[in-house]
Image (cartoon, rainbow, N blue to C red):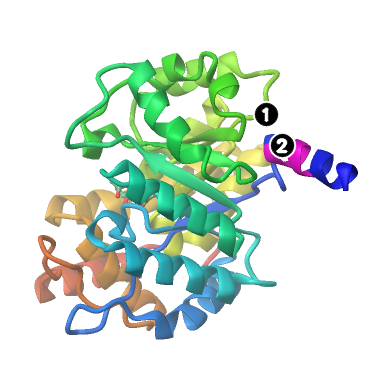
Amino acid sequence: MPSCFLWRAVSSMTPRKKLQGLVAATITPMTPDGQINLSVIHQYVDYLVSEQNVKNVFVNGTTGEGLSLNIRERKQLAEEWVRQGKDKLDQVIVHVGALSLPDSQELARHAAAIGASAIAVIAPFFFKPTNKDELIAFLQKVASEAPAVPFYYYHIPPLTGVKIRVEELLDGIKERIPTFQGVKFSDTDLLDLAQCINKNEREQFAFLYGVDEQLLSALAIGADGAVGSTYNYLGRKTTLMLQAFAKPDLALARKYQFLTGEFLNFVIKLGFGVAQTKAVMTFVSGIPMGPPRLPLVDASEDFIVKAKAKLDSIVWPDGD
Ligand SMILES: CC(=O)N[C@H](C=O)[C@@H](O)[C@H](O)[C@H](O)CO
Ligand SMILES: CC(=O)C(=O)O
């Protein structure tokens, strides 16, 4: 029916639903022998919703070791998150970036077929795009495989080494990628973020910040929300920070940022990455996240003891 086509065309260019609140960058649970462990995702979804008040997830990203998984594993994880999240989560965003364009396209088609809320793609990071046009060309080839699915660029220069500024990338991007919906911005360059937001006053792009320890600064500059690893276990506290910021009660918002920062500052000094995130989530939630996949190696017992003691020692403003 023509009206149905029209609806599809329009829906491909507008957000299905405005993303609200925090997005947890999901961990990929693994068994002790290093296989992905789909069996705990049901429990993981319930934990995020009921204990952390987090209703959006970003699957197979950095925290999910997405680039260390094979295509089959990535599809299985995406399917399980969509299945378990049905009627419980608001949005399941699936990261489909890969070094190989056909792999990335296959994952994009798969994400569309299973009903993911959105897809995201990082810049290829072995052979790298050297300018904005090369990067957009790559992103466009992936996005066009899922023409009805909102698309986010995942900017994470500390890991990809691709430092093309987002502010530049945005120029004309909607013409090239009609599904373009926003950016997951995981960089400390707040001038770049500010320029993006300033440029897009009229447009409906969402800027989701990804450096959890300085989210409050990004909110001040106008970020719409946040995607991060710490919202797995500090989601409730960070939501209280968002509420304080919205009120606005900046003193209270700062207090929350200082305290989450105190924990992160402590663990970063000990050495903090995905392996350590898995360990922290395991002791906080009680859900076994298992070991990371090589080249990452398990967090040490010493790290776990110290991180737990630190987290337990924090006195939160809400008395928890
Ligand atoms: C590099 C990395 O993993 N960044 C995560 C997401 O972008 C963050 O959530 C950090 O884990 C967090 O900000 C702690 O440094
Ligand atoms: C932090 C984040 O968004 C990721 O793990 O991809």
Viewer-proximal residue, 19 or 310? 19
Horizontal placement of 182 versus 105: left or right?
right
Q: Amino acid at mark 1?
A: Gln
Of callouts 2 and 1, the N-terminal one: 2
Instruction: Residue 287 in the image: state x and y as whole percent.
Output: 38, 82
SS at circle 1: loop
Horizontal placement of 28 versus 216: left or right?
left
- The residue under label 2 is 14
Instruction: Residue 233 in the image: state x and y as whole percent.
Output: 42, 66
Gap in Å between the C-alphas at discs 2 and 1? 8 Å
Of helix, strand and loop, which mostly describes the magenta segment? helix
Which residue sits at x=60%, y=41%? 147
Question: Does 58 appear in magenta?
Answer: no
Instruction: Residue 172 in the image: state x and y as whole percent.
Output: 54, 15
Viewer-proximal residue, 49 or 113? 113
Q: Check disc 1: other Cα within 10 Å, few if <14, some if 14-19, many if 20+.
A: few
Which residue sits at x=37%, y=64%? 74
Q: Check disc 2: other Cα within 10 Å, few if <14, some if 14-19, many if 20+.
A: some
CB under 8 Å between discs 2 and 1:
yes
Asked if 241 appears above or below 49 in the picture, the reply is: above
User: Which residues are the magenta region?
Assistant: 8-12
- The residue under label 1 is 204
Name the quadrant containing residue 39. bottom left
Which residue sits at x=49%, y=82%? 43
